[in-house]
Image: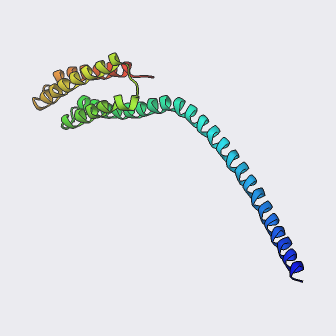
Amino acid sequence: MRLLSSILIVICFTFILFISGCGKKEEEVKTDQKESKNKTETQSQNNTQSQSNTLSQSNTSTSETAKLWNQIEKINESMGKGINSGKSGHLEEPVAEIISMIKKIPAAAGNLEPASLQTIISKTNELRKSGEMLDKYHHANQTSELKEEYSKFTLTLNEIKNVLPK
């Protein structure tokens, strides 16, 4: 009887191990397949994203530069309207704001050529000097000189714009 009970226990134990072992292996195989499939999909998505990131970096930098430049042009137009109408306020603030935005352009534009970067720096210095003259002529009520200096200021802005990536 003991022998029969021992054999029955061994058979039950083997049967339980066999069933539980098969279940684990099947689940492990399915899990491994899912993980492998997920890794493949993730790698594919990463490759696609890195390719699109490379393309979008230039588009993003161009759009960031365009946004900054649109703001610069709006400030300059507003300043020009004030100068031409004879009702311009302090010109230090809009000039300083324009210069501040121009300083952000190299970072927004990404990989600018060294010559372009040097041009932007030198033209920004010209804008600063021109801005000082604008404010001087404004406070001295020298309207014709103010308008002439504003033309130079706008010309320098356009020279900077021509250096930027399109």
Task: Say above or below: 40 vs 129.
Answer: below
Considering depth in this image, is 44 or 122 the residue closer to the camera? Answer: 44
| Quarter-of-image position of residue 140 | top left
Kindly identify the residue that appears in the image at 32 percent across and 33 percent down: 104
Give the number of marks.
0
Kindly identify the residue that appears in the image at 72 percent across and 55 percent down: 28
Locate the N terminus and report the quarter of the image it occupies.
bottom right
Quick check: can you spot residue 151? no
Instruction: Tell me residue 73's x, y (percent).
Output: 35, 30
| Quarter-of-image position of residue 147 | top left
| Quarter-of-image position of residue 106 | top left
Instruction: Tell me residue 6's x, y (percent).
Output: 84, 77
Task: Say above or below: 84 vs 3.
Answer: above
Instruction: Tell me residue 10's x, y (percent).
Output: 83, 72
Locate the C terminus and report the quarter of the image it occupies.
top left
Task: Say above or below: 76 vs 114.
Answer: below
Considering depth in this image, is 4 or 23 the residue closer to the camera? Answer: 4
Kindly identify the residue that appears in the image at 76 percent across and 57 percent down: 25
In this rendering, would 17 be left or right of 97? right
Quick check: can you spot residue 113? yes
Residue projecting furthest to the bottom: 1
In this rendering, would 7 be left or right of 166? right
Considering depth in this image, is 81 or 98 the residue closer to the camera? Answer: 98
Residue projecting furthest to the top: 115
Instruction: Tell me residue 68's x, y (percent).
Output: 37, 34
